[in-house]
Image: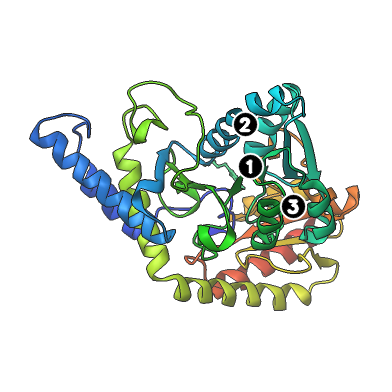
């Protein structure tokens, strides 16, 4: 029976480009730090991959730091970024302030909570209907802000926040702040130009863009100071010690190049599947869309299905080889996430919400099959 995989925000299958890189890299085993010929060859591959990824982020290759995942990139940016300023601000007798949102992934909200417990003041901007309130941003952007960490694309609703406007207000009013964005869900679904959005630090994860798991990237703008999160052999310009995961890096470079070079084609494919889903789902009684009010990523479609709880629907769909998620897969095992409440849903609405997340590998035929499966399942559960 055909599998319909609509859970691409949780993770993605390997692209054919990444699979080819994986096969090719199976024999590249030397440590890039080794001084012999094999080591030099690995080093060359590593730097080639860095260059390929830098191109997809419109930046210099010296601004790319390889990490193990999006979570590590977020932790490095937040804990390493805030630490630089905390001593200075504490000396001045002003509590160091962090600006974030009420809808961040735990990879951001948890390190922020650690800093809050250490005495940092945290302002969590509201994200009702997937939009940031500029008046709140202006009020929050005081001189003592040391870090702003605001996600690019929300993993549960697909909301894309207006980072350009938000970061420009914070940059103007809080000149010492380091500006970080978690772009794990936005990368290769939006064109991300650090100089346009005004970010100093950007987190990316390989397994969300059809590369292997266990590889991430932290973009760090030239000259931006953070303290390294991992101490050791000094790899990655001292910002991420530990022997590089060259296999993961090569799959990410291949997947990223494929996604970047085919950006328009892949975006159109996703749009067509989304449109097919929306028109078919609109015909089904009791289906409601949680669409962000302004900007959103077309690969994430959050819907409410009246009747059973989303977990029940999810398992019934899974029995039919159709795979979706209830909210964010990364946090769903830990219990309810507050993101949908922050979006403006009631508890009942949030409990009946499922997330459909697409990739360029999905088809319109799958969209129709999904809607048929949903109708069958609902007839069974109601
Ligand atoms: N940030 C966001 C927005 C995510 O959606 C995820 C994973 O779902 C992460 C961070 C964590 O990324 P990783 O699984 O690579 O640690």
Secondary structure beneath label 1: loop
Q: CA distance from mark 3 to mark 2?
A: 47 Å
**Which one is in front, 99 or 161?**
99
Q: Are marks 3 and 2 in contact (CB under 8 Å)?
A: no
Left or right of 303? Residue 232 is: left
Residue position marked by numbered label 1 in the rendering: 176
Q: Does residue 215 sit above or below 33 in this rendering?
A: below
Place of residue 53 in the rendered image (x, y in percent of width and height, measured from the top left): 37, 54
Would the CB of label 3 be found within 8 Å of ligand 1? no
**Viewer-side label of 3, 2:** 2
Residue position marked by numbered label 2 in the rendering: 85
Q: Are marks 1 and 2 in contact (CB under 8 Å)?
A: yes
- Residue at horizontal 50%, vertical 29%? 227
Residue 284 visible? The answer is yes
Secondary structure beneath label 3: helix
Residue position marked by numbered label 3 in the rendering: 313
Secondary structure beneath label 2: helix
């Amino acid at each position: 029976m055909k599998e319909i995989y609509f859970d691409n925000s949780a993770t993605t299958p390997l692209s054919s480009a990444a699979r080819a890189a994986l096969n090719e890299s199976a024999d590249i085993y030397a440590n890039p730090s080794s001084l012999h010929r094999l080591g030099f060859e690995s080093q060359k591959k590593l730097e080639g991959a860095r260059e390929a990824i830098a191109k997809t982020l419109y930046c210099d290759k010296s601004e790319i730091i390889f990490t193990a995942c999006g979570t590590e990139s977020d932790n490095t940016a937040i804990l390493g970024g805030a630490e630089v300023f905390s001593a200075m601000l504490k000396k001045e007798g002003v509590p160091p302030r962090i600006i974030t949102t009420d809808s961040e992934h735990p990879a951001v909200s948890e390190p922020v909570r650690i800093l809050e417990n250490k005495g940092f003041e945290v302002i969590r901007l509201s994200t009702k209907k997937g939009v940031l309130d500029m008046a709140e941003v202006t009020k929050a952007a005081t001189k003592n802000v040391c870090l702003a960490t605001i996600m690019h694309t929300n993993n549960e609703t697909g909301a894309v926040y207006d980072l350009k406007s938000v970061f420009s207000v914070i940059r103007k009013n809080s000149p010492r702040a380091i500006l970080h964005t978690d772009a794990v869900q936005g990368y290769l679904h939006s064109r991300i130009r650090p100089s346009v959005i005004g970010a100093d630090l950007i987190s990316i994860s390989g397994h969300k863009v059809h590369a292997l798991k266990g590889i991430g990237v932290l973009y760090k703008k030239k000259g931006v100071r953070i303290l390294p999160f991992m101490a050791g052999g000094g790899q990655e310009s001292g910002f991420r010690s530990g022997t590089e995961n060259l296999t993961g890096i090569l799959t990410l470079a291949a997947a990223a190049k494929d996604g970047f070079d085919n950006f328009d084609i892949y975006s159109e494919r996703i749009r067509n599947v989304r449109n097919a889903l929306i028109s078919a789902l609109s015909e089904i009684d009791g289906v409601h869309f949680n669409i962000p009010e302004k900007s959103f990523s077309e690969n994430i479609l959050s819907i409410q299905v009246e009747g059973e709880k989303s977990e029940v629907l999810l398992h019934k769909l899974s029995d039919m080889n159709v795979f979706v998620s209830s909210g964010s897969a990364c946090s769903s095992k830990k219990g309810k996430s507050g993101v949908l409440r922050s979006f403006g849903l009631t508890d009942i609405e949030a409990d009946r919400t499922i997330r459909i997340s697409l990739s360029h590998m999905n088809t319109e035929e799958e969209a129709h099959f999904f809607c048929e499966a949903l109708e069958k399942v609902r007839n069974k559960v109601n």
